Structures are given as structure tokens and as C-alpha cells.
Image (cartoon, grey):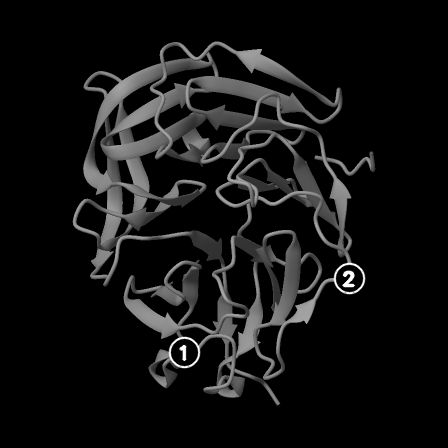
Amino acid sequence: MDKCRVGSVAANAKVALNSINQSDFFILNSAYGEKIVEDFILDLDSNVGFSLDSNEEFRVMPMTSKGDRPFDFGFFSEGDEDSIVLCRQKSCWKKRLLSTSTETKLRFDMNFEHKNGALVDTGHSIWVTGGINANNQTHNGSDIYYRGQWHLGPELPLPMSHHNLLRISEDKVLLIGGKNMFIFDSIAGSWQQMASNGAEDDDKLVCGLWKPLRMVVCLAGETAQILHLRTMEWQLKASTNVNFQKGIAVGEKFFGINHQGNFVKAQIDSYSRKSGEIKFRNVKLIQRQNNETNFVHFKLTLVNKVD
């Protein structure tokens, strides 16, 4: 096994506004001017991109896609600020955001398929785990993307799909899958099983890390499950002011679909241990045409080109 250190998928990219045109990978309205786009979300199922600018205004952007089915996942290419890697089955393609050329297929394929798997940016590499293969079987294999190539990664302790991976410290990654919870120690290179304390078995849980209070917040519907990292104890059925059915979390920000099928973005604002309520701010909605979603999140900084 190649040993690639396992240490958020969000990355920074600077692109020139006046270079963007209809043939680019995504299309931006020229009304952006010099505004900063803080979050860009690509829905790999519906082939639509969403962005939120610094004034919390939504834009919808049609995307291009390669092949006869949607991509399974994507991430920013390390050391390459304006390129992303998009993967389907075991193959991946690199796409430059401001290039009119087609995607370039990576030379090496992954060892496994990772549809409905989970990935985490370790700080050194991208670690992609579990998921469902072409035979509709859930597996425990993993791949690590490091320096432009795929390497065999550590196996999960159990076959899993629809799970969550969170980097909770420099050398530790938290795995939440149903009622199972493990921590991977990259120094020891091993998994440690943790007590679930009754955490609900729900494959729609979307978990994010709120660093100020060292909490993992998992949303499902109108309730939240909270893991306090200091004690590794769960608080179940905490009330919230959002409805979140499925999607992704990046730190304390959640992007997904609510009970009405609309796109929702919400950011953790406060938590009351006394009332058990966790509140979200900057809750934004945008209507959608369907409820299917497979989100990937990118963090972009758009600037005007300086000659």
C-alpha cells in the first residue's frame, strides 16, 4: 500500500472576470463586477451550479458535463488553483475553469468506485472512501489523491456509503456512518471505534464541524444531532430553525435541499446548552426543479484581471 498521509474540500481560486465567456466550464453573469463570490456549489446530478456572493445573493449557472452519466464527486486539484477534478466510476478528469478545452482524463484510475462515498481534504491529499460500486455493493475501500495520482488508501473499518468524514484535528479524521463512529489516527495508521451513545441510524445525516465550540453538528430534517468533541458525547434531537433533508456541509456552513425541494444555505450561529437549540443565520433559499442532489463545494475568489 502506498502510504499517503491522511491530514476542507474548500479551496481558494482566483480567476479573471473579464476572461469568462459562454464556452467556459461555468458561466457567470457580468453583473458581478468586482463582487466576491464566497461559495460555489456544483450539483453533479442536475448539472447546475449555484453561487452565493458576498451580499448573500444567489446566482444560478448552467454547467457542462462529460459522458453519459453525472459525475460522482469532485474537488479542487492540489497546487492548481483554477482546476478541478471530476470523477465517475473509477475514472477522473481534470478541468481548467477558464479553459475552452475539454476535460483531460487522468492517466491513472482509482482502485475503487465511490458513488455515495465520502471524502475529506486532509491538508496533504484528498481521501475518498467507501461508497457503492458498479455491482451495487457497498464497500470499505479507499483512494488517496496525492500529487496528481491515485494511491491505495486505508480501508474503512466497515463497508459504508452515505457516511461523513470530518477532519477534527491535524492528525485525526472522524467517521460517522449510521450508528457507527470511528476516529482514524494518521500517526498510528489505525481506526479506533467510539461509543455512538444512541446516535440515530440515518443515511441522510449531513455533518459539519463547528470549531468555536468543538462540536460536530449533524442535520436531518428539522432536528440536529450534536457530538461534543471534548467529551465525545451525543446530544440527540436538538431543535433548529432550518429544515435540511440532504446535501453537504463545509465547516459550519450547510448546503442542500429542504422539505420543499428548494436549495438552502445556512450557517451555524449559536447554541444553547440549556434549551438544546442550535440556531442558524444567513438562511437562504432558491427554488429548484427537482429534489435529486449530489453537491460538491468550492470556495472561489473572483477578481478583475489586472493587465
User: Alpha-carbon neighbours of circle 1 within 10 Å: few (<14), some, or many (≥20)?
Assistant: some
Q: Which residue does the image show at 36% across and 17% down from the upper left?
A: 199
Tell me where residue 237 appears, x and y as whole percent.
Answer: 24, 21
User: Alpha-carbon neighbours of circle 2 within 10 Å: few (<14), some, or many (≥20)?
Assistant: few
Mark identifier at residue 107: 2
Residue 110 lies left or right of residue 62; in this view the side is right
Residue that numbered label 1 is attached to = 28
Tell me where residue 32 appears, x and y as whole percent.
Answer: 37, 78
Q: Secondary structure at mark 2?
A: loop
Residue 124 visible in this rendered orientation of the protein: no
Residue 202 visible in this rendered orientation of the protein: yes
In the image, 30 versus 159, the foreground residue is 159
Tell me where residue 278 appears, x and y as whole percent.
Answer: 25, 30
Type of amino acid under label 1: Leu
Considering every residue shown, the one lying at the far front of the view is 135
Mark identifier at residue 223: none
